[in-house]
């Protein structure tokens, strides 16, 4: 039996202090499956949302949108893998000109991208020697431009890295008893 087809759509709402108001989100391709997974705001007029969409070449590619207080605009973001799966799961912005986004590519390799106020850039991340397909970052928090913590999992084990403004560093994390 064939699986049912569906189309996802982008949706956003803004809280005005009294109620939620639906706002239009830019669509890359109204016929593609699009997903916004996480958002970070530094003010009521500066939010960044990240996710992914099914691209025209049959691959999943990164999606980044920016809210200016009135409308959403798509930002160009790089994709580390040209042939497979590129998805952003989380974003944290220390300021309107400093954001870090994390996610996964292909068979489960963690990756990150940074925003400098002008463009997104892929940031090299060390990959743990034990990583197997299934590793991913699902959260990130950046209290400043030079301090971020990314967390996720690697084949069921915890995974964490820290950013010092110049590079990512693997951190040892305890795993809960299994």
Image (cartoon, helix red, strand yellow):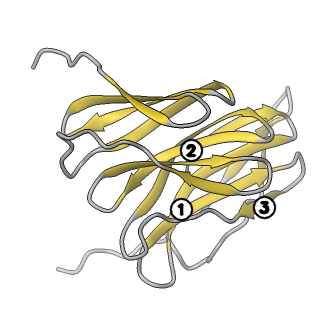
Q: Residue at x 73, y 57 (%)?
A: 119
Q: Secondary structure at mark 3?
A: strand
Name the front one of labels 3 and 2.
Answer: 2
Q: Which numbered marker is on residue 62?
A: 1
First along the sequence among labels 1 and 2: 1
Q: Nearer the viewer, residue 78 or 54?
A: 78
Disc 3 designates what residue?
Answer: 73
Q: Which numbered marker is on residue 150?
A: none
Q: Residues within 10 Å of mark 1 (few under 14, many from 20)?
A: many
For residue 69, side relative to residue 138 (left or right): right
Residue 138 % position (x, y) = 42, 39
Q: Secondary structure at mark 2?
A: strand
Q: Residue furthest left?
A: 178
Q: Residues within 10 Å of mark 3 (few under 14, many from 20)?
A: some
**Alpha-carbon span between mark 3 and mark 2:** 17 Å
**Alpha-carbon span between mark 1 and mark 2:** 10 Å
First along the sequence among labels 1 and 3: 1
Residue 147 % position (x, y) = 60, 25
Residue 47 % position (x, y) = 76, 42
Disc 2 designates what residue?
Answer: 101
Q: Are marks 1 and 2 in contact (CB under 8 Å)?
A: yes
Q: Quadrant for residue 131, please give it.
A: top left
For residue 162, side relative to residue 106 (left or right): right
Q: Residue at x 62, y 32 (%)?
A: 165
Q: Are marks 3 and 2 in contact (CB under 8 Å)?
A: no
Q: Quadrant for residue 107, please give it.
A: bottom left
Above or below residue 82? Residue 171 is: above
């Amino acid at each position: 039996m064939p699986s049912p087809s569906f189309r996802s759509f982008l949706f956003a709402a803004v809280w005005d202090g009294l109620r939620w108001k639906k706002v239009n989100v830019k669509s890359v391709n109204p016929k593609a499956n699009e997903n916004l997974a996480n958002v970070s705001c530094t003010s009521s007029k500066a939010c960044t949302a990240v996710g992914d969409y099914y691209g025209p070449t049959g691959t999943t590619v990164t999606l980044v949108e920016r809210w200016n207080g009135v409308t959403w605009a798509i930002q160009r973001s790089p994709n580390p893998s040209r042939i497979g799966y590129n998805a952003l799961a989380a974003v944290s912005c220390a300021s309107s000109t400093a954001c870090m986004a994390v996610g996964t590519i292909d068979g489960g390799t963690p990756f990150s991208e940074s925003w400098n106020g002008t463009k997104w850039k892929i940031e090299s991340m060390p990959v743990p020697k034990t990583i197997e397909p299934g590793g991913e970052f699902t959260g990130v928090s950046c209290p400043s431009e030079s301090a971020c913590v990314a967390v996720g999992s690697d084949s069921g084990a915890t995974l964490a890295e820290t950013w010092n403004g110049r590079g990512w560093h693997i951190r040892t994390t305890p795993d809960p008893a299994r």
